[in-house]
Image (cartoon, rainbow, N blue to C red):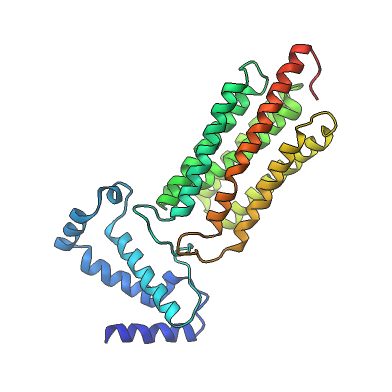
Amino acid sequence: VAENTHRRCFIVEMATGSASSQGDKEPVYRDCVKQCVRTNCTGARLRGFQSAQPQYMALTGWTCRDDCRYQCMWTTVGLYQAEGYSVPQFHGKWPFARFLCFEEPASALASLLNGLACLLMLLRYRSTVPRQSPMYHTINAFSLVSLNAWLWSTVFHTRDTYLTEKMDYFCATAVILYSIYLCCVRTLGLRRPGVSSMVGVLLILAFTSHVSYLTFVSFDYGYNMAANATIGMVNLLWWLCWCWQNRRTLPYWWKCGLVVLLLHGLALLELLDFPPLLWVLDAHAVWHLSTIPVHFLFYSFLIDDSLYLLNTEKMGVKVE
């Protein structure tokens, strides 16, 4: 009887125009979570849950309430599909089939593979390029910033919490800003170190202001997206201008141009935003998977350019 009552309530809600609401706003979902928590997350039932919970789930912070939300999410999804409605999002995300402790298995794996590709090519860079190359230390620092970002991306897609979400967003912004600094050092800083230092200070101030606003004022997703799109466009245009200016003198310029175009073009995959295939693979995961080969091309460019700078410095040629 209770199940049929919930089902009728669900159908009425859908018929009155709440189909565009996210799944966690549905009464059937909220009632399910309340009932589950009241039944399973207190007293002896809670102790039983904790004793039976796998250690890896406990270590990654999965609670009894989280498990109730997960189970009720699928109950709600089943009702949507049974009535012929499209799959809803819950708490701003598509429903994903949990694998072990991984909330978004495909995105977590893709982030990990991006990090491994970045690490592999950093090791190759260090083994190929002498430390005397003018860009050596700047590129190493950029690689560490990137590795940190992919680490937090992996953590966030493994377990979505207040902290992991913020770290994922902030570290991604840091990579874009450091890419601008990397471009500044390559295009201006080798001849005018003071300019790159000044730009570096401005970028640090911009990053600090960005993080402070999102942390202490309002975590505005729209603002964060607009800010990252703006600095991303600055990064894109600056690198492309340098590539165009050096297309006749540097035979490897196309690698840089292709990398920045691919990174910005592949980001458009997120606009597809479809429910996960097999409840695992969504547009975000496809985007992360598509960027893995880009690391190899980008570091190939960095190696070629660093060796070129080292050779021109030895010959006393002015770097352009």
* Front one among 176 and 158: 158
Q: At 42% from the left edge and 69% from the top edge, which residue is drawn?
A: 24
Q: Is residue 167 visible?
A: no
Q: At 72% from the left edge and 37% from the top edge, which residue is drawn?
A: 255
Instruction: Please count the marks in the image.
Output: 0
Q: At 60% from the left edge and 34% from the top edge, which residue is drawn?
A: 204
Q: Quadrant of the C terminus?
A: top right
Residue 300, above or below 21: above
Q: Quadrant of the N terminus?
A: bottom left
Q: Position of residue 16 (x, y in %)?
A: 49, 85
Left or right, 82 with respect to 303, comes to: left
Q: Position of residue 207 (x, y in %)?
A: 59, 40
Q: Position of residue 149 (x, y in %)?
A: 52, 40
Left or right, 258 with respect to 281, comes to: right
* Front one among 118 and 176: 118
Residue 277, above or below 295: below
Left or right, 245 with respect to 310, comes to: right
Q: Position of residue 280 (x, y in %)?
A: 46, 60
Query: Residue 240 occupies which quadrant of the picture?
Result: top right
